[in-house]
Amino acid sequence: MSISHAAETGATAGTDVPGIREVTQEEIERFWENGWIRLPKLIDPDLIGSLLQRAQQLMGPGGDANEERLGFDFETSPASQSYRSPSEVDELFRTVVTSRQLGRNAALLLGRDHATRFFDDILLVKLPLSQRDDRGQPLGWHQDKNPTDRSWIYFWIPLDHVTPEQGAVQYMSGSHKLGPLWRGGACVNLEEAYRLAPRLRSCALSDELTFEPGDVMAHCSWVVHGTDANVGTRARWVYRPSFYPADAVYMGVPSPTITQRGIAPFEPLAHDDFPVIYNPEGTGEKG
Ligand SMILES: O=C(O)CCC(=O)C(=O)O
Ligand SMILES: [Fe+2]
């Protein structure tokens, strides 16, 4: 199985994929207020079902059979079993994640009709604690850092039913307005989050929600979020791709993924491996 970053499937970036709807104006407004938004039935449940099947081919029916690919998959986390970049090895993931609709939705949510690039994707399977206590732990409160000078969009896409006891994502509403609060990516407990950033006490915690296949969460950079443990009995399957404005500039945050592609600090984060999937001036274009 290849793990190179280039698309090898022949799927064309920026093509229309039936079964993905556009976000509504009301959703966009609420997203800006809170830094996250629940998007009911964003994606056709049948398409999600097909993605789940593909994910299970990659990770096993229980989501626990894939071996970490050294130097490629992230260090295994006690919060989930992961599989990095399924879109590099599976055509359906590639098609969905480079769809014009997701690119346009990212632009609409960010509030500017900009060209959008796809950055990367990952499968996050939170295993029941009863089955694997090293893959079903809570993921502490954190902000998603990004290496550019502007906000990104992350879609949190359940591939199956997800109930609160399985460790769905929770947000501190409005916390994106506080900007970067502590070392990017660091996960902390609630008490520590409030100590580091006392203003977070004024940000309501979102409810732990239930998801049907096709329901999606979207969040932006800097909104504080985390997950509880999976105290249920079933694996929690989530697919998590990220997108950014094509005119965003790389700020030099250390990232092998970026520097290996010859992109220098303060240049636009532009490369064929981060394809333009939506361009307001026309259909999507490659690179
Ligand atoms: O649900 C998860 O496993 C991770 C959630 C998260 O931190 C994210 O989507 O950025
Ligand atoms: Fe996150």
Image (cartoon, helix red, strand yellow):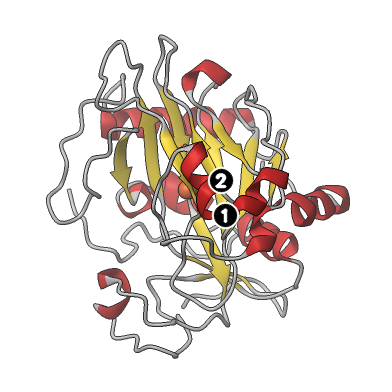
> Is residue 166 placed above or below 14 in the rendered structure?
above
Q: Residue furthest left?
A: 70
Q: Amino acid at mark 1?
A: Ala
Q: Is residue 17 visible?
A: no
Q: Could you classify mark 1 by the number of other residues whose Cα lies within 10 Å: few (under 14), some (14-19), or many (20 or more)? A: some
The tag on residue 194 is 2
Mark drawn on residue 197: 1
Circle number at residue 277: none
Kindly identify the amino acid type of the residue bearing the numbered disc 2.
Tyr
Disc 1 is placed on an element classified as loop
Query: Does residue 145 lie above or below 97 as drawn?
Result: below
259 sits left or right of 146 in the view = left
Residue depicted at 30% across the width and 42% down the height = 83
Percent position (x, y) of residue 219? 62, 51
Q: Nearer the viewer, residue 219 or 176?
A: 176
Q: Is residue 270 left or right of residue 169?
A: left
Q: Is residue 261 left or right of residue 265?
A: left
Q: Position of residue 99 (x, y in %)?
A: 57, 57
Residue 213 on image: x %, y %:
59, 26
Tell me what residue is drawn at x 51 percent, y 65 percent: 13
